Structures are given as structure tokens and as C-alpha cells.
Image (tube, rainbow, N blue to C red):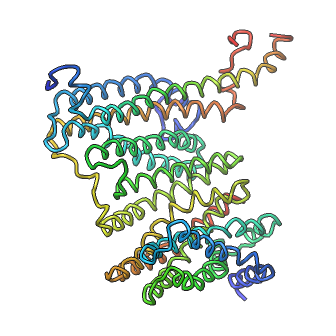
Amino acid sequence: MHPFFHLLQRDVRLASRRPLDALLPVAFFVLAASLFPLGVGPEPQTLQQIAPGVVWVCALLSAMLSLATLYGGDYADGSLEQMLLSGHSAVLLTLAKALAHWLLTGLPLLLVAPLLGVLFGMDADPIKALCLSLLLGTPILSLFGGLGAAITLGLRNGAVLILLLVLPLCMPVLIFGAGAVAALQSGISPAGHFSLLAALLLLSLLGVPVATAAALRISV
Amino acid sequence: MNPLPRFFTFAAPSRFYWLAGLLLPWLYLLAGALAAAGLYIGFFLAPTDATQGDAYRIIFIHVPVAWMSMVLYLAMAGWAALGWAFNARMASMLARAIAPTGAMFTFLALWTGAFWGKPTWGTWWVWDARLTSELILLFLYLGYMALVEAIDDVRRADLAGALLAVVGAVNVPIIYFSVRWWNTLHQGASISMTAAPKMVSTMLTSMLLMTLACWAYAFAVVFARARAIVLEREQSSEWVRALARPLSKVKL
Amino acid sequence: MMWNSVGDFFAMGGYGLYVWGSYGVVAAWMALEPWLVTRRHALAVRALDELHADEQEFSSGGLV
């Protein structure tokens, strides 16, 4: 089996041994989103209006939660160094890691999002748009998150530093993701937003793994 | 020693230290002279604006510092990348020297922007494309500074910072474009800071002079900071050791 | 020259707070930053002195 799938399988298997750990970001996602009605008031109009932005921001923050351990575990026990020395492509390594992160964090967030949509009183069509935007956007978050994790590998305050480094880079994703749903809610076609999200996804797939591989070589 | 400077001559910390020290007073002087000229034209020759009154004169400092904040980010990313590509620590030191000054220019752009917005648009802050992008640029600077401070290994910090700066530089156009898109869609908050008064030639001259003044100032401060960084990092080299004075001669 | 008096100049047509609030902060910063950097340089030189005091002590054959 190609090393790419080996790595993927390994990461998923390791995470499945600690299912609660793996689901913490999802729990945070729901919790954080639930705070907004408490803070803003339960008026349905307001909630419907802020829903896309709130769900997206919470998804962004939740996706960042599980990043510190993305490379940290392998770095601590020396296996990361072995992987980099193995002669296999470091770019494929970073892609596998990003995909694993998406399967374990991004995908669960995507699956739980409709629930949040209902909590915020969104209609069926906006919820579908929300899910599509998350489908396109969360992989980008995993990719940039992996870059942040690789750059801050082994640092004391790595977890918070990742947030500071990665969140500015993810702002376009937030803008187009939440914007797509908001556009649909106000009757405009979200096609432009989705196209731009897809374009960002393609660009990230092409560029970010290369940068992440370079970051790993610097950090290890 | 080869009398003609080669391309990498000043990549040696010792030579940079010497050159920067030589240029420093002249750079400050240049900055002062250009600022004096620019401010004179801006405050005494440029006419009062019909719609904004004299508040528009903030433009003579707001636009230069905003431009500098962007130029310095590119310079920082460029020097950091050179330090990475050529394994030249002097380039990385220069990048580190630029960061705090760049961050301050960004803050000043936001501050002067707010002070310009209040009398003209009635509010201290407006989420328009330019100011929002400037805010994000501030976060990019702070991220770079936080990253290089957090890494103990100096060379790893240099390289990691370079990667981050380059990724940031590539992302800046994407971020700016997406913020402009976002801003034009939300028509309510579309009052834009870009509605500058119709530019008369005296206004343009003043802005240009002030920009050059800020540039000279930035050169001066960055060079001075880079000299300090060189001393901090190159402690084990001969030429730096020779700079140490005997303690008996040092006033404590 | 368009200012009828020094007072007019400082008032800036009623916008004095904003104009001088902007320029003031920039000027304050441009006075502070060079001083901070000079101080950093001086501290670096001082650290050098202390670092190599022992070396000089050794080479001069006793306390300097």
C-alpha cells in the first residue's frame, strides 16, 4: 500500500482509540455556537441573520483546536524524523496529515452543522448552502492548520501561536463561506462565492502542502 | 581586500554594521528635511478642502504611513526570503529589524485613519476594505514577531519567520480582494475611506515628500535596530569582541 | 499662507483635535522609536563589555 494511505490509516486508527479526544472539537463547536443566542438574545430574526457567520467562526476555531497534536505526537516519539528521512515525499506526508485532520475534525463539524442550522432557525436551503460551504472550506482550514502546526512544532505556546498565525490566512475562507449562505438568505445567488471557495481550495491544495513540507524540514 | 564592492559585500555583518553606522545620521537628517518640506507645503500651501475642511490634512500623514506599512511588509518578506535562499544571516537579521517598525506604521495607519474618519464620516471605525485589510496586516506582522520570538534556535526562527512572511505576502492580495468583495456586498457599511478630496498638485507634492520622509525614517530606524541585532547575535566573532571596551573605562 | 493667526492654525477649522491627534501620535512615536533602538544598541554594547571582561582580565594578568 502506498505510504500515503498507510499514514492516513495510521492517523485515523490512532485517533479512533481515543474517540472522546477526537470529538472534543465537535463538542466545542456546538458549545461555542450555543453561546451566541445566550449573548445576543433568542429573537429568531437576529439568530437567522447571524447564523452563517456564527457557525462559520465557530467551525474555524474548532478546526484549529486539534492542530497542536497533528505533528506533535509523531515529533515527540521521533517517528516524524523517520518519516522525513525515509525518502518518501514530504509533500505527500503533509497531504496525508491534512486529509486525516479533515476526516477526523472537519468532516464531523460538517455533519453536525445542520443541527446548528436548525438551532438557529435556518431554512432548509440555507442549511444546504452552509453544508456545501463547509464542505469546500474545512479542507482549506485543515491545510492551513497543518502549515501552522508544522511551523510551530515543539514550541511551548504552540497552540495559541497557531491561532495567531493561521486565522488571518483563513479570513478569505470565512468571508466567502459565510458570505455564500448570507447571500442565499438575502436572495442573491451564492454561485460566485462557491466558485471562489472552490478556487481557494484548489490553490491551497497546490501550494500549502509544499509550504508545509518546507516548514517540517525547518522545524525538525 | 578587493576595493570594488561585490554583490554580497554587505552581507557580512561587520561590513553592514560599518555602512549602516555611516549612513545613520544622514538618513535621519534626510527624513527631517523631507518632512519639514512636506509639512510646510501641506499645511501652508495646500488649500483647504471644500467638503472636508482642514481635517483632510490628515491625508498627508495617513497615506504615507499606510503605504510604508505595506512596503515594509514586502521588504521584510523579501529580506527573510533572501536570508533563507542564500543562507545569509544578515538578511534575516534585517528582516527581524524591519518587523517592529512595520507593525508600528500599520498601527499608525489605523490610528490616523480612525482620526480622519471621525470628523468626516462621524465614526471612529468603519469596516471598509482598506482599514480592514490594514488590520489584518497588523495581525500578520504580530504573528511574524511572535513566531520569531517563540523559537529559541535562532536559525530555525529565521527560516520559520521567512516561510511565514512569504506565505503572508502571497496571501495579502487574496485577503485584500476578498475583503473588498465582502465590503461591497454589505452595502450598509460601504462608506469608504478612499473618498479623498480632489487632489491638487500641492497636495500630491506634500504626500510624496512625506512618503519619502517616512521611507528615510524607516531606513534609519531599521538600520539602527539591525546594528543592535548584529551586536546581540554575533557576540562570538572577532570584530565584535574588538568593540568591547575594558570595564575600567566603562561608566557604570 | 492662509492662516490668519497662530490660533487659526492650531484650531484647523475646528478639526484641531483630529489633525493634531494624528500628527501628535506619529511625531511622538518617531521620537520614541529611535530612542528605544539607541537604548537597545547601548545595552548590547554593555552586554559585550561584561561578557569579555574576564577575557581582558586574563590577558592583562590581573584585575583590570
- B39 displayed left or right of A165: left
Please determine whether, in this image, residue A51 is positioned above or below residue B8: below
- B133 displayed left or right of B18: left
Q: Nearer the viewer, residue B169 or B80?
A: B169
Taking the spot 22% from the left edge, 29% from the top edge, the residue there is B43
Q: Nearer the viewer, residue B133 or A78?
A: B133
Please determine whether, in this image, residue A66 is positioned above or below residue C33: below
Q: Classify residue A161 by image quadrant.
A: bottom right
Q: Position of residue B63 (x, y in %)?
A: 31, 43
Q: Quadrant of the C terminus of chain A?
A: bottom right
Q: Position of residue C45 (x, y in %)?
A: 65, 23
- Number of dots carrying numbers: 0
Q: Position of residue A27 (x, y in %)?
A: 67, 76
Residue B67 visible in the current orientation: no
Q: Nearer the viewer, residue B24 or B90?
A: B24
- A147 displayed left or right of B110: right
- B60 displayed left or right of B73: left
Taking the spot 66% from the left edge, 26% from the top edge, the residue there is B240
Q: Classify residue B26 by image quadrant.
A: top left
Q: Position of residue A165 (x, y in %)?
A: 57, 58
In the orientation shown, which residue stands out farthest toward the right? C62
Residue A212 visible in the current orientation: yes
Q: Quadrant of the N terminus of chain A?
A: bottom right
